[in-house]
Image (spheres, rainbow, N blue to C red):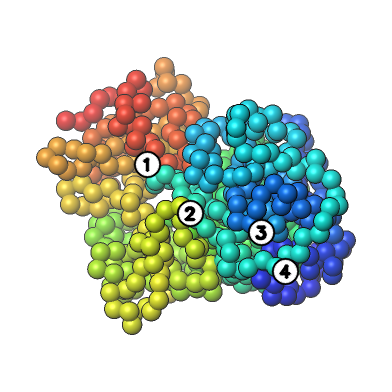
Amino acid sequence: MDSRRPPLAPACPTLPEYVRHWAETTPDRRAFTFVEHPAPHSRGVHRTLTWRRLDVRVRALAARLAEEAGPGERVALLCPQGTEYVAAFLGALSAGLVAVPLYTPGLPGHADRLAGVLADARPSVVVTTSRAHDEVRDFLGAGGPRIVVADEVPDGGPDRQPGSLDPGAPAYLQYTSGSTRAPAGVEISHGNVVANARQALAAYGLDTRPMTSVGWLPLYHDMGLVLSVAAPVARGALSVLMDPAAFLHEPVRWLRLLAAHPHAVSAAPNFAYDYCVATVTADQKEGLRLDGVTALINGSEPVRPGTADRFHAAFANQGLAPGTHCPSYGLAEATVFVCAARPGEPLSRFALDRDALAAGKALAARPDDPRAVLLTGCGTPAGQRVRVADPVTRVPLAEGEVGEIWVQGPNVGRGYWNRDSEEVFGAEFADAAAGPGRWLRTGDLGTVLEGRLVVTGRLKDLIIVDGRNHYPQDVEASAQEAHEAVRRDRLAAFAVPGGAGGECAVVVAEHARTAHLAELDVAALVRAVRGAVSARHGLRLADVVVVPPGTVPRTSSGKVSRALTRARYLEGAYGGQARTGAAV
């Protein structure tokens, strides 16, 4: 049975070698299952590859891709979520090519990003499936890269030996989400991804006990790729996949898969846990058992303790243990995983003084103080080093001081594809003795409290008005709690040029789907938002714009893109939307 403990994994240097190992030692064991939901209320159709069958498909695709491109050339993956995506990714790696995990052109709102990434990566070959072939062909146009249709490549062909791969060579380009800037391709080596897969397994205690990865995160996203592909391949464990759209349509599907598979491990951002709380009905909870779930990873920035509390309160009667929620921190430049709270540990909670935090100090406050910032610790590093440094002086900071998070480890990528990376990937402390070697500057702000990393925000996102720092996600939290018609997690706070060479703050917020703009008292909503932000942050908003659902742009990973929202605001794109007028 698949629930038995898998054999301990060997120390293979590349993912294709792991595939070959499991195909030889446990050929009939399930490797990947994709659960398709062809109808609105479908309970799911399961399509499974064993390790033997996966190895056959990987070798066939590797041979086919090697006919189309030479070593080191890029192969863009424009496949729908599914087992073909997994086989194509591993096939590209096995062929010595550089995979570029992407998505089909039909992903709403992301055609421009896809075109930009393809122009940057310059792939020689695009892999897709027969279902998506026509839209991919039309999107690429005449003179585009050659197209290989994964599910039309027959088994057989010349064998590809993964043992010849160089662990230091690039395996794939992981494009950043673009939440604060234009997407950049991080060069992840074969050694990087194997190291990070092992780090993740060790962090959640999965290197020595059974696990089943259950995921709906897209495979082009760093967390989805490592947790749903790399870690299960390195562990020889089953990975159960579903489409993100299937989760959004009916989130209980994810919970049912968690319940159906023993020792389930999964990951989701804040909004997904809150979405389950809001939409899963009492009837859907009937018969649902979640006591077999090992870990639920939350990698949002920052992780909100209220989200974990609401989720566990909503599903405690289904047997969900409170220690399953694992706040974590990572980024594409470090493959993905950096720090993690371990399963079974109680949630580490910190109530911090907002003014002190803005000034760079993490000072305790009463949790019931309306001006307190409630944050969760993201555990400790997983097989790597993490320091907090002053971003200007490059001096390490003591516990409780807020600065930029720096990372050093075998999972840190080679650099950005086709652009200068030294400033980000080659940082050094002012005093080399404080932390020898080269470090990754993450651009994230945080501190260490009680030995745990606490992420406070993004350096580039800081709103600085009248010399005071304000974290945008903190302002957004106050704004969305100010009025019931503000749609949760669909708003952006950012700074724009103000008078006398300074900056001022703006909020662009979607209204809830249940509210109709024609019937909405926009003036009252804006007054509520302004009042809440002023009272909690001492910040006067220069403008509040209310827009229809779906208007605030999001990244390919589902985060709100503050950078793109700001750019559109400055271009006047929201000029015709509901507003009460900018403050003067």
Identity, as a three-letter code, of the amino acid under mark 2: Trp
Name the residue at 66% across, 71% down. Answer: 13
Q: CA distance from mark 1 to mark 4?
A: 43 Å
* Residue located beneath label 1 in the image: 563
Q: Gap between marks 2 and 1, in whole Å? A: 21 Å
Q: Is residue 221 above or below residue 130?
A: below
Secondary structure, mark 1, is: helix
Q: Contact (CB < 8 A) between labels 2 and 3?
A: no
Q: Which residue is mark 2?
A: 417
Q: Nearer the viewer, residue 147 or 238?
A: 147
The answer to whether residue 420 is above or below residue 396 is above
Q: Earlier in the sequence, mark 1 or mark 4?
A: 4
- Distance from Cα at disc 3 to Cα at disc 1: 35 Å
In x, y percent, where is residue 549? 47, 29
State the mark number for residue 163: 4
Q: Given this view, does label 1 or label 4 mark the residue nearer the observer?
A: 4
* Residue with the mark numbered 3: 96
Whether residue 224 appears in this view of the structure is no
Q: On the rendered structure, is 155 left or right of 229?
A: right
Q: Is residue 486 left or right of residue 108?
A: left
